[in-house]
Image: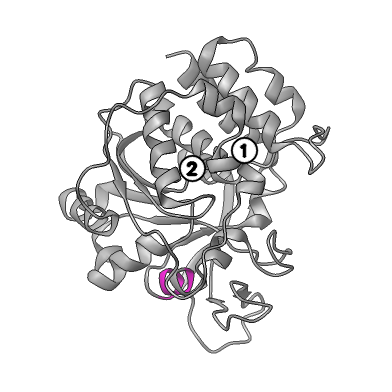
């Protein structure tokens, strides 16, 4: 029996890849997409989620709007990475206008509703800022006890950040929310330590081109994710962080260990940084499970094969 999966997303082009991977897998049944601000505004992330589901004829999956701003900080977005409105022009042209609306419920309430319905059958993958999950925890602190796992895409444990020298984007955008989830939910933390080494090379991108509308969308996403600031395409490849989280969830490609982690919420130069007790110098017990290593080749193969499975459906 496939496990139930709730995706908390801020599409965003690597969110799109994670969604397609999940929809192409027989191992998970996607029960809903909850949207949060992050890569772009909440209105844009919600529209992008609806448009993607319209494109792939999965409007049966509910989309639920969440929070439109961080708990304590001003909203910082990543349209410079994902394109205006969270999608590059080629994707905006490919994706249809949505014919459906988000359901009339807040994401935090929907998360708790699904947790109560499915219990330990439910896994949550939160691949954007953690605001919706933190709010759900505030409403019902027993959320982690009800379900299987909460996967977080965020953090830079032993490596540098991608929005400041110490912080990953998802944790920086709402450090207070990220801190709450780490402290109270025992999440599976999948950060830049494992997502950046598992970039997809150009050869992977070429496999999707000219394989129908779905394949071209995937190829366009991977091409855009490999672009430098000047618009040229790097030879190294495409960093697809959210897709790595999905590969870790669908296939055993990540190595984890329990650890004690804090998220800096001081609003200074280290705001959103993950303080990882690598050597166990703190007397505090572990509070999360962190991904420290990735089988790069297996991860790449998992991303490509799950996307190809979706394309061939």
Residue that numbered label 2 is attached to: 11
Give left or right: position of 153 versus 116. Answer: right
Q: Residue at x 65, y 74 (%)?
A: 278
Give left or right: position of 156 versus 181. Answer: right
- Nearer to us in this view, 142 or 9: 9
Span of residues in magenta = 178-183
- Nearer to us in this view, 299 or 84: 84
Tell me where residue 245 appears, x and y as whole percent: 53, 46
Tags 1 and 2 touching, CB below 8 Å: no
Disc 2 element: loop
Counting residues from the start of the chain, the first of labels 1 and 2 encountered is 2
Q: Residue at x 73, y 63 (%)?
A: 159
Disc 1 element: helix
Tell me which secondary structure the magenta stretch mostly adopts.
Answer: helix
Give left or right: position of 104 versus 209. Answer: left
> Residue 177 got which mark?
none
Q: Residues within 10 Å of mark 2 (few under 14, many from 20)?
A: many
Relative to residue 216, is residue 79 depicted above or below?
A: below
**Residue 88: quadrant of the picture:** top right
Residue that numbered label 1 is attached to: 299
Relative to residue 104, is residue 132 depicted above or below?
A: below
Q: Residue at x 52, y 14 (%)?
A: 213
Q: Is residue 182 located in the magenta-colored stretch of the structure? A: yes
Relative to residue 212, is residue 90 depicted above or below?
A: below
């Amino acid at each position: 029996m496939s496990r139930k999966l709730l995706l908390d997303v801020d599409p965003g082009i690597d969110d799109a890849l994670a969604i397609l991977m999940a929809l192409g897998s027989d191992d998970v049944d996607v029960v809903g997409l909850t949207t949060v601000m992050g890569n772009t505004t909440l209105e844009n992330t919600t529209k992008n989620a609806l448009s993607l589901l319209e494109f792939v004829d999965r409007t049966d999956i509910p989309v639920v709007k969440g929070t439109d701003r961080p708990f304590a900080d001003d909203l910082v977005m990543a349209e410079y990475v994902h394109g205006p409105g969270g999608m590059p022009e080629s994707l905006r042209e490919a994706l249809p206008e949505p014919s459906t609306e988000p359901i009339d419920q807040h994401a935090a309430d929907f998360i708790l509703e699904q947790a109560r319905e499915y219990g330990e059958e439910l896994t949550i993958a939160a691949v954007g800022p953690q605001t919706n999950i933190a709010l759900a925890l505030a409403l019902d602190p027993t959320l982690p006890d009800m379900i299987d796992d909460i996967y977080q895409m965020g953090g830079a444990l032993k490596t540098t950040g991608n929005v400041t020298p110490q912080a990953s984007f998802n944790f920086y955008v709402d450090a207070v929310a990220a801190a709450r989830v780490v402290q109270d939910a025992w999440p599976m933390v999948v950060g830049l330590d494992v997502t950046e080494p598992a970039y997809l090379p150009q050869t992977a991108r070429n496999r999707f081109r000219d394989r129908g509308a779905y394949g071209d969308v995937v190829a366009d996403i991977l091409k855009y994710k490999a672009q430098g600031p000047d618009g040229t395409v790097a030879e190294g490849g495409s960093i697809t962080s959210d897709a790595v989280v999905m590969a870790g969830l669908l296939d055993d490609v990540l190595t984890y260990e329990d650890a004690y982690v804090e998220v800096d919420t001081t609003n200074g130069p280290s705001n959103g940084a993950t303080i990882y007790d690598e050597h166990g110098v703190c007397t505090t017990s572990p509070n999360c499970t962190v991904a420290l290593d990735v089988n790069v080749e297996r991860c790449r193969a998992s991303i490509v094969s799950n996307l190809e499975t979706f394309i061939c459906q």
